[in-house]
Image (cartoon, helix red, strand yellow):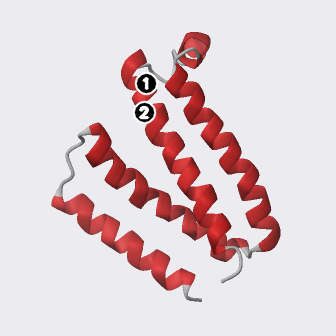
């Protein structure tokens, strides 16, 4: 299907950016929504945070190509594939606990992506 490989590349890169950024923030420490702006420069000095943002930027550029070639009603729901990637990577790489209820929710998301991708 036209555009699906590019969608998967853009979405995967965005998800990888999430994981790398989380690793960086695990190094930096917690910040609140109110304090993040005041700490932005030191946060960006953490290499993993900057690399995560770079992944996002490249993902956004790829997404420009996606939306110029594929119906948005098909492309945007594919962003849900990032949930799967982040879900598995959070468990494997970050050691996060994954409950049965979260697994069930992820299965519903995957089913939705499959249905939309076949339309």
Q: Is residue 10 above or below residue 114?
A: above
Q: Residue at x 66, y 49 (%)?
A: 59
Residue 26: tell me if it is visible: yes
Horizontally, is 37 left or right of 84 in the view?
right
Q: Which residue is mark 2?
A: 22
Across and down, in percent, residue 33 comes to 50, 24
Q: Is residue 94 above or below residue 31?
A: below
Q: Which residue is mark 1?
A: 25
Q: CA distance from mark 1 to mark 2?
A: 5 Å
The quadrant in which residue 101 appears is: bottom left
Q: Quadrant of the N terminus?
A: bottom right
Instruction: Say few, some or many: other residues with alpha carbon within 10 Å of mark 1 (under 14 / 14 to 19 / 20 or more).
Output: some
Q: How many marks?
A: 2
Across and down, in percent, residue 109 comes to 40, 70
- SS at circle 2: helix
Q: Is residue 65 above or below residue 51?
A: below
- SS at circle 1: helix
Across and down, in percent, residue 22 comes to 42, 33
Q: Is residue 54 above or below residue 45?
A: below
Q: Quadrant of the C terminus?
A: bottom right
Residue 29: tell me if it is visible: no
Q: Residue furthest right?
A: 68
Q: Residue at x 40, y 30 (%)?
A: 23
Q: Residue at x 61, y 59 (%)?
A: 9
Horizontally, is 94 left or right of 72 in the view?
left
Asked whether the beta carbons under mark 1 and mark 2 sit within 8 Å of each other, the answer is: yes
Query: Which numbered circle lies on residue 1?
Result: none
Across and down, in percent, residue 32 comes to 45, 21
Q: Residue at x 54, y 21 (%)?
A: 47
């Amino acid at each position: 299907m036209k555009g699906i490989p590019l969608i998967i590349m853009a979405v995967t890169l965005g998800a990888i950016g999430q994981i790398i950024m989380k690793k960086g923030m695990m190094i930096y420490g917690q910040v609140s929504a109110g304090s993040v702006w005041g700490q932005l420069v030191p946060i960006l000095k953490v290499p993993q945070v900057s690399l995560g943002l770079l992944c996002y930027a490249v993902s956004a550029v790829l997404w420009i190509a996606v939306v110029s070639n594929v119906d948005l009603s098909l492309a945007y729901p594919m962003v849900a594939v990032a949930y799967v990637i982040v879900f598995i990577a959070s468990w494997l790489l970050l050691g996060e606990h994954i409950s049965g209820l979260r697994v069930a929710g992820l299965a519903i998301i995957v089913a939705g992506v499959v249905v939309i991708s076949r339309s």
